Image (cartoon, helix red, strand yellow):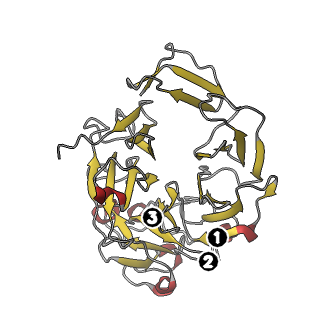
Amino acid sequence: IRQNRPRGDTTGGGVVVLRDANNDGRAEVVGNFGPVGGTGIALDGAFLFVDARAAILRYPFPAGATTPSGAPDTIVKGLPRGGHAARNFALDGRGSMYVNVGSATNVCQEGNRPGPGTKGIDPCVELETRAGIWKFSSTQIGQEFTPAARFATGIRNAVGLAWHPTERVLYSTQHGRDNLFQHWPALYTEQRSADQPAEEFLRISQGDDFGWPYCFYDTDLKKLVLAPEYGGNAKDAGRCATKKAPVVAFPGHWAPNGLLFYTGTTFPARYRDGAFIAFHGSWNRAPKEQGGFKVVFVPAAKGVYNGAYETFADNFANGKLDPSTAEHRPTGLVTARDGSVLVTDDKGGRIYRIRYSGTR
């Protein structure tokens, strides 16, 4: 879907509404509102919830509208700023909201990335207010961010976050840390560091701890290992033996930004049990080729994942697998009303619609 806006027109606010009224793949109706927009956005009944960086806002938004019918209410305020700044969220349809508050640093060190051999802060004070999921009411106005509302911890950045519609469980992705070879060359070769640590798909329950910054999932060893900043030797689990492992692990640095549980009926039945994940694409897999820049499907059987995944949609980058040259980079996912899957692209400014033709 392409927005019919004149070249160079930068007017409008933080939220853009595009409506393809005649289903021809072009937005005939365009609306803009709000002073700021972040990563999280969701419709729930007659309301639109928006990530406004340090707050989550709720606009009254009648069906068919392109602008709100009134001023927004502030559902949550005082969210931490800076660092991993996406405040994406998931609504469970039962009055609760789960908000991602990513870490401020790579691996909880003074100065974020201070250089080779630098130890991590232990205990990591960031975990009190960051690197986890926070739970709030989606109906109560004026809630303040507080450490007491933390739902799960040890998640570096859960940009992909979704509530499973039938399991009634929260899932997320995790962006893994960087700089293993660059900061610990005695433990990690450049080749091994290209795939480490895993990008992760997590099943989250109240009180879970996934280990960041102390731990990460090693794609070769297929287990959580202790990070070198905290005394790790690149093979032993140490304190990470008590942390929760992912349900599926992917190659390092692919950058999982979107997570979708398909709720339509037009795709084959196998796609109604499992997950779609949009990988934004890597910048730091040298000397290997950069990876990601695609949407994968993770199959499941009655909520059980066996670690497998398959490419669902590819070539967004048009063969240019680098953030600076890629033509398009998949970011967000949603099931459309007609059963198609929409994929947003934050590099080329497109929305892709993927429909099932019935010929496969």
Q: CA distance from mark 2 to mark 1?
A: 6 Å
Amino acid of disc 2: Gly
- Of residues 176 and 303, the one nearer the viewer is 303
Image spot of residue 128 (x, y percent): 70, 70
Q: Which residue is mark 3?
A: 183
Please identify the residue farthest to the right as the structure is shown: 142
**Is residue 210 shown above or below 337?**
below
Image spot of residue 263 (x, y percent): 43, 53
Amino acid of disc 3: His
Number of other residues with Cα within 10 Å of mark 1, as a class: few under 14, some 14 to 19, many 20 or more: some
Q: Which residue is mark 1?
A: 151
Query: Is disc 2 placed on a helix, strand or loop?
Result: loop
Number of other residues with Cα within 10 Å of mark 2, as a class: few under 14, some 14 to 19, many 20 or more: few
Can you tell which of label 2 and label 3 is closer to the viewer?
A: 2
Left or right: residue 343 compared with residue 321? right
- Seen at 67% across and 64% down, the residue is 135
- Seen at 54% across and 66% down, the residue is 155
